[in-house]
Image: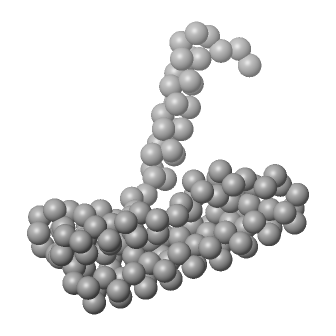
């Protein structure tokens, strides 16, 4: 097949257009009920003052629980390959939440009863994260990946 310069440019342009179309048409927005969308909405509502700190922490803890479970189900094999990818794909959200809860209780943005209840939820979040880490570490060892 012998293509002249102008035909080659046209063919290259068509291929580029088709690739761009396929790439951008397959990019779907996140659903509104996705955990990251709920976190952003809760942040905006807290800044505006539509929700209180207690409700904000409830939304954050629930979203982090759901997001951690979802990431584990979808990216289990990638997490098992290395410790770095494991921490990147499923970071420990509970460490930051403990500190934020303590700060909110000290500044009296949440009550003592709400603090204890939310602290318990964060402990559940931490225990689920620890159990996922244990499963991934066992699989990493079993498959012979570096620990």
Q: Nearer the viewer, residue 41 or 131?
A: 131
Q: Nearer the viewer, residue 83 or 102?
A: 102
Name the residue: 65% across, 50% down. Answer: 84
Position of residue 96 in the picture relative to residue 81 (left or right): left
Q: Is residue 49 above or below residue 80?
A: below
The C terminus: image quadrant: bottom right
The quadrant in which residue 102 appears is bottom left
| Residue 73 in view of the camera | no
**Residue 13 coordinates in the image, percent (x, y):** 50, 25
**Residue 35 coordinates in the image, percent (x, y):** 40, 70
Position of residue 143 in the picture relative to residue 82 (left or right): right
Name the residue: 45% across, 45% down. Answer: 24
Position of residue 46 in the picture relative to residue 65 (left or right): left
The N terminus: image quadrant: top right
Name the residue: 59% across, 17% down. Answer: 8
Name the residue: 80% across, 67% down. Answer: 139
Q: Residue furthest front?
A: 106
């Amino acid at each position: 097949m012998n293509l002249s310069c102008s035909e080659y440019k046209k063919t290259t342009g068509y291929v580029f257009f088709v690739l761009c179309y396929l790439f951008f048409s397959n990019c779907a927005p996140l659903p509104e009920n996705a955990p990251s969308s709920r976190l952003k909405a809760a942040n905006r509502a807290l800044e505006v003052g539509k929700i209180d700190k207690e409700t904000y922490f409830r939304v954050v803890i629930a979203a982090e629980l759901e997001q951690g479970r979802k990431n584990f189900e979808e990216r289990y094999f990638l997490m098992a390959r290395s410790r770095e990818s494991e921490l990147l794909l499923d970071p420990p959200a509970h460490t930051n939440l403990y500190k934020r809860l303590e700060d909110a209780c000290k500044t009296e943005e949440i009550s003592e009863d709400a603090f204890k209840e939310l602290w318990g939820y964060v402990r559940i979040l931490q225990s689920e994260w620890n159990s996922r880490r244990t499963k991934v570490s066992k699989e990493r060892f079993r498959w012979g990946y570096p620990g």
